[in-house]
Amino acid sequence: MKSYIFIFLILCLTTVTGCKNKSESELNSPLKIIGHGGSGFETFFSQLPANTLASFEKALMDDEADGIEMDIQLSKDDVVVVFHDKLLDNKTDLAGPVRDQLFAELIKCDFHGDFTMFSKGKHSISSLEQILTQFNDQLQSKYFYFNIKVGVHPDKEKYKLVMSEQLVRIINEFDIQKKAIIETSDISVLKQIQLLDSSIIVMQDIGDFENDFKYVLENNFAGLVVENNNISAEQVMLAQKSGKRVVIYGEKTRGGIREVLHKNPDVIQTDKINLTKRLAD
């Protein structure tokens, strides 16, 4: 209840001052469908490992998604690499954290995914810059969501600072300030990126809307990323009226995707791009 009172007061203040983080045209813009990890996380029937170049190509070229979401971490030599898991053990022939390996070793490893019999030897870990270079022709027409995996590192504070600096550098070098969206649950990283370059879009990956939305407001983040089970249609509307974008993820079934669509978010991150597009029409 206290959270709703806080949010109500913020909304009132926003109305009085006329300050908005999002224009009316943006609020009413069409739903964006973003490929989760590319074309979705690997299954028996979809055997492209997520966060691989092949998965991103399928999402953008074949499925014609509005953009892609990718998970990013730092290598030992501070290269931003695209990989989901905290440990390399389950999806590569290396072991331990990504942070313990030099980029030169990561790009040589076998990124085999969950179904090794089908994909072994076909994929590799890429740097963020390699991915963006590959899709250079689409950088101004597609959206790129960078999900920062902070994890637990002995040098955690340094790690977060270097990640922030590297991301700001890359986004500016590729001139994608309007197309790149940074998302993470770590508020300090988002604030650091805001300090380095306030033009870059940052969104908080929250747990529960009622408990966490106040942090999105307090820190003037562009919006929130949330699992479907943790936000209602009314809360989506409340966030949008306060000028915040809402990204929902976590549903793979027809019924679940329909439920997300009925909540009217700004963005859906999905493993089922084509099904989501058909249901949205």
Image: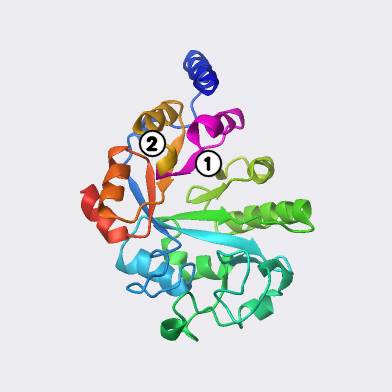
Q: How is the image coloured?
A: rainbow
Tell me which corner region of the image, top left, top right, bottom left or bottom right, holds residue 152: bottom right
Whichever of labels 1 and 2 marks the residue nearer the N terminus, that label is 2
| Mark 2 secondary-structure assignment | helix
**Left-right relation of 243 to 77:** left
Does residue 79 lie above or below 256 as drawn?
Answer: below
Does residue 108 lie above or below 202 as drawn?
Answer: below
The numbered mark at residue 4 is: none
Label 1 sits on residue:
207
Q: Is residue 219 magenta?
A: yes
Q: Residue at x 32, y 44 (%)?
A: 260
From the top left corner, tell me how far across and down residue 73 is, in percent: 63, 62
Nearer to us of marks 1 and 2 is 1
Does residue 52 lie above or below 262 as drawn?
Answer: below
From the top left corner, tell me how far across and down residue 163 is, in percent: 68, 56
Magenta residue span? 208-228
103, 153: nearer the viewer: 153
Disc 2 crowd rating (10 Å Cα; few below 14, some 14-19, many 20+) is: few
Q: Residue at x 26, y 49 (%)?
A: 255
94, 197: nearer the viewer: 94
From the top left corner, tell me how far across and down residue 151 is, in percent: 66, 56
Q: What amino acid is at disc 1?
A: Gly
Q: What amino acid is at disc 2?
A: Glu
132, 222: nearer the viewer: 222
Q: Is residue 18 magenta?
A: no
Does residue 214 lie above or below 171 as drawn?
Answer: above
Label 2 sits on residue:
26
Q: Residue at x 64, y 79 (%)?
A: 94
